[in-house]
């Protein structure tokens, strides 16, 4: 599998489309166990990202993801800004000067992103956060050939599992036991990120056009 | 150790709410600490609820002096953005610190301690002691 810079750029553009489509639903999830602004924040943040990147062509993946990260850090007011921003910033360091990314390099980027999320959020897997999607996706990416349907399935199942978890981080932790039976909004937006990635690769796992 | 003679630790109040941050600055101004700058960095650039790395870094830059800057924050993601802001100012490494303290009491104590000329570390430690204070002890 090879992801070209164009395919990666399309990933981010697809992610924005998913955030716009699911804006209300994300905020609904956040209303239940948070402050209700996750959909609004993600939709605005990714729209700003797309405004910055869509008319540019990037020669290598590092500068593309640095731009994505810095825009999210600047434009998203809630926890999603520093968390997604740090994630993409750490990934950008692994993808620096790469014009195409193979699966191993992609996995290294995701691994660095996860380390960044953990440092920034002081969270671990099982705390009912975005990490509960990024972790299983990383395991999948490092162990199996990257394939559209399986990637989507991995992210979706991981997201659904957060429903049974008790929140230990963020505003949701204030809800304690009451956070159970709700999907974590950050896990859902992360599922959308990887669903968008799945849409940017073909069934054979190669970059789609 | 007192920082002599002039520079006093500056304080930045980071809240999700612009009004809350400004309100705390107003409240603390009552202590009439000469030469201590307490500045608000609340809300987002759209003046919505949230925090902004850009507003925080800008405010730190405005109040910075050689005694350093202490940051106080309200809720979780304000801490993340405070940390990010500090990381984005590598030239000030070590002289921008974050206090793990209740934002109102912590800022108040920090302003008093800064006014007395204490160092950044001492001001930070004093602010953090507010965490264990019992408010209702007679």
Image (cartoon, helix red, strand yellow):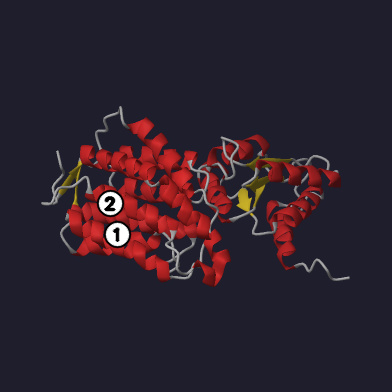
Can I make out residue B94 in this image?
yes
Q: What element carries label 2?
A: helix
Q: Are marks 2 and 1 in contact (CB under 8 Å)?
A: yes
Pick the quarter of the image with the C terminus of chain A. top left
Q: How many marks?
A: 2
- Residue A133 in the image: state x and y as whole percent: 34, 61
Q: Residue furthest top?
A: A55
Up/down of A147 relative to B35, above or below: below
Residue placed under numbered mark 1 in the picture: A155
Calculate the distance from the C-alpha at mark 2 to the C-alpha at mark 1. 7 Å
Protein chain holding label 1: A
Q: Is mark 1 on a helix, strand or loop?
A: helix
Residue placed under numbered mark 2 in the picture: A195
- Classed neighbour count for the residue bearing mark 2: other residues with Cα under 10 Å, few (<14), some (14–19), many (≥20): many
Tell me: A42 left or right of B2.
left
**Residue positioned 43% across, 56% down in the render:** A186
- Residue B42 in the image: state x and y as whole percent: 64, 42
């Amino acid at each position: 599998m090879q992801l070209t810079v164009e395919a990666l750029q399309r990933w981010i553009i697809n992610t924005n489309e998913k955030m716009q489509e699911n804006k209300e639903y994300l905020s609904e999830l956040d209303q239940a166990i948070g402050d209700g602004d996750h959909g609004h924040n993600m939709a605005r943040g990714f729209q700003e990202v797309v405004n910055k990147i869509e008319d540019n062509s990037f020669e290598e993946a590092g500068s593309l993801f640095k731009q994505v990260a810095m825009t999210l850090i600047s434009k998203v007011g809630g926890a999603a800004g520093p968390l997604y921003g740090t994630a993409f910033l750490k990934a950008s360091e692994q993808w620096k000067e790469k014009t195409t990314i193979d699966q191993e390099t992609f996995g290294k980027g995701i691994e660095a992103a996860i380390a960044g999320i953990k440092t920034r959020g002081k969270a671990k897997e099982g705390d009912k956060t975005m990490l509960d999607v990024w972790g299983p996706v990383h395991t999948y990416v490092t162990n199996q050939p990257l394939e559209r349907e399986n990637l989507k399935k991995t992210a979706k199942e991981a997201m659904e599992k957060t429903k049974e978890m008790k929140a230990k981080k963020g505003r949701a932790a204030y809800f304690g036991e009451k956070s159970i039976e709700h999907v974590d909004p950050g896990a859902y937006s992360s599922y959308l990120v990887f669903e968008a990635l799945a849409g940017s690769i073909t069934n054979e796992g190669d970059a789609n056009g | 150790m007192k920082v002599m003679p002039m520079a006093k630790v500056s304080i930045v109040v980071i809240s999700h709410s612009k009004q809350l941050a400004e309100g705390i600055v107003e409240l603390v101004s009552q202590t009439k600490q000469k030469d201590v700058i307490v500045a608000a960095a609340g809300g987002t650039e759209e003046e919505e609820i949230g925090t902004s790395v850009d507003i925080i870094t800008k405010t730190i830059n405005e109040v910075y002096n050689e005694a350093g800057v202490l940051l106080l924050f309200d809720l979780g993601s304000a801490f993340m953005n405070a940390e990010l802001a500090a990381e984005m100012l590598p030239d000030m490494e070590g002289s921008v610190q974050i206090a793990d303290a209740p934002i109102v009491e912590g800022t108040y104590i920090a302003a008093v301690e800064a006014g007395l000329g204490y160092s950044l570390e001492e001001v930070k430690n004093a602010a953090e002691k507010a965490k264990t204070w019992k408010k209702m002890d007679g």
